[in-house]
Amino acid sequence: MSDTKHRNVNRKSIYLAIVIFVAAFTYYVVATLQQNHRIRGAKNNSYLISPESVKFGGEMLAGEMFRGMETARWEKDSELVAEIKKVIAQKETPSEIFKNNLSGRVNIASILNNVFRLDNDEELKILRNAAPKENEWSISDETLEHLSEVLNRFEPKRLSIRNALNRPDTRFYFIFEQDEEFGEVIDVRAADYLEDYLLLEEYAIGRALREGRMEDALDSLVYIFRIAQLAAEVAVPAVRSSAALIRLRAVDIMQTIILNPKFNKRYLNGLYEMLREQLEQWTPDKAVWVADRASGLKTYHRILQYGLEAALTPEEINDLEKRDLLVFVSRKQRKRKKENTANTTNNNSEENGVKEIILLKNNFLNTHIADEIFYLKSMQKVIDECNKPFYQRISVLNEINNELLNRMGKELEPVIAEILLRGIVGSMRLHAQDRAGCEVAFLAMSLSLEKPTVAHLIANPFSEEEYNISQTKDVEDPNKKFILVSFLGNRQPFRIPDYRMETEKQSNP
């Protein structure tokens, strides 16, 4: 009898615990949805219209400063307010960085989108698969013959992009689009098409070298460097990294052109001037990470305003789901009226639909303050380190990463900061390799042409080791010598014919 009674008590306790858990979870979901609804509802009223001035942190600030991070206007936490005010004082807010103003100039990003967005992707895949993959750049005659028809179909596209690049007022700008559900978004898909344009010019160079048209090969190379320079000026890490990969590829192509038998000293003078311009107009690393921080501020705002799905990529959301950090809630909503109602019997009817709302288990409306503070403080450290070469930044970057690891799995884990901060070291390394690769080629040119090297341009940002300079003889022609310049971590030395020998012959006939 007592055992039966004991079992009944246990069952009641279990049922009670389940009821309490369900009630608590339901309360959390309802409360979160209500808070999200209050915040997201702002997009339909005057709160998103920037006032002339805003009282923030005890002082009046221009309302325009909060464009792109409107929810920050209501932050009251003194530490977070102080960090945001630092960004405002530095004039590095989203409104300062992401300006929707072309000033009548040509936007190469729009042209790339128009040329490639609706293109035959299968033919582009053929070109990509046949392109040189690594080591010394070259395209065989057989490959050019096989791709001849495809390349001819793409020729008008290549020339249309060239026409835009020829204009002095051409720039690479952000493309702003208005999403019905998530408000203003910045489209940087044009960066994905940079590689496609590179491919077209690569094959044009292959054709030109095959037919002995050195000037045409050099023209294509100049256009590649030109578009890489424009893309690098955007200063967003992803676009800047695309520019770095293109420029590193261009250096490999330039190596092949320089070693071609038809290449001569006159051509090298032209390449020297082109590369000098690239180095002198180099996008500072600081600009990249200032823009990245502005993008991060927009991310926090978009999550608070519109939800995770408006700010994170599907891959990032999937990663959070794998870590069991998300809650998926089905919520009924009213669908918009169908514009095309030819096949419906009731043209004025609205259908009810169900949308899955994605929430963090730890209510982001409460935890975002600590998350955002950690992010802004970490980014300030990153930005401050940009005045040093890459290899000297590693210690600080490791400190940030270690602190982030220590916070993982804890109550106020900076979930969004972790997503935003990941990849910084890899991007910085790539950008340093880009700079070092160009400097190696420029240094070899300077030596061969007996040009005075500019000290501030040649500092090896990638490695503490100095650039290694040597000389070697041509295997086939012992009287011909090459200058070799390399650095620790470089794939192979950059080789240039030593034209100083020609100078000596001319001075001593």
Image: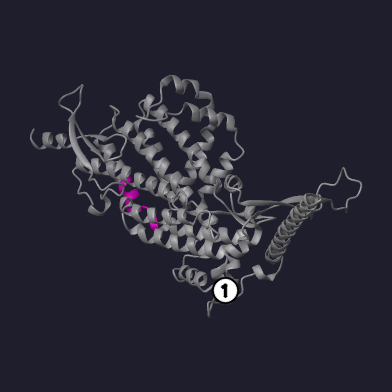
Question: Residue at horizontal 61%, vertical 60%?
Answer: 364
Q: Is residue 279 magenta?
A: yes
Tell which of 304 and 475 is nearer to you.
304
Q: Quadrant of the C terminus?
A: top left
Find the residue positioned furthest to the right. Answer: 345
Q: Is 312 in front, or is 14?
A: 14
Residue that numbered label 1 is attached to: 76
Q: What colouring does the structure picture have?
A: one colour
Looking at the image, residue 491 lies above or below residue 299:
above
Q: How many marks?
A: 1
Over which residues does the magenta segment extend? 274-286
Query: Where is 308 relative to 74, above or below?
Result: above
One can see residue 103 in this view? no
Where does the image place residue 243, in percent across and percent down from the top left?
43, 45
Relative to 216, say whether 337 is above or below: below
Task: Let me know if residue 21 is in the magenta part.
Answer: no
Asked if residue 365 lies left or right of residue 255, the reply is right
The residue that appears at 52% across and 72% down in the rendered structure is: 81
Q: Residues within 10 Å of mark 1 (few under 14, many from 20)?
A: few
Q: Residue furthest left?
A: 508
Left or right: 288 as drawn, with respect to 409? left
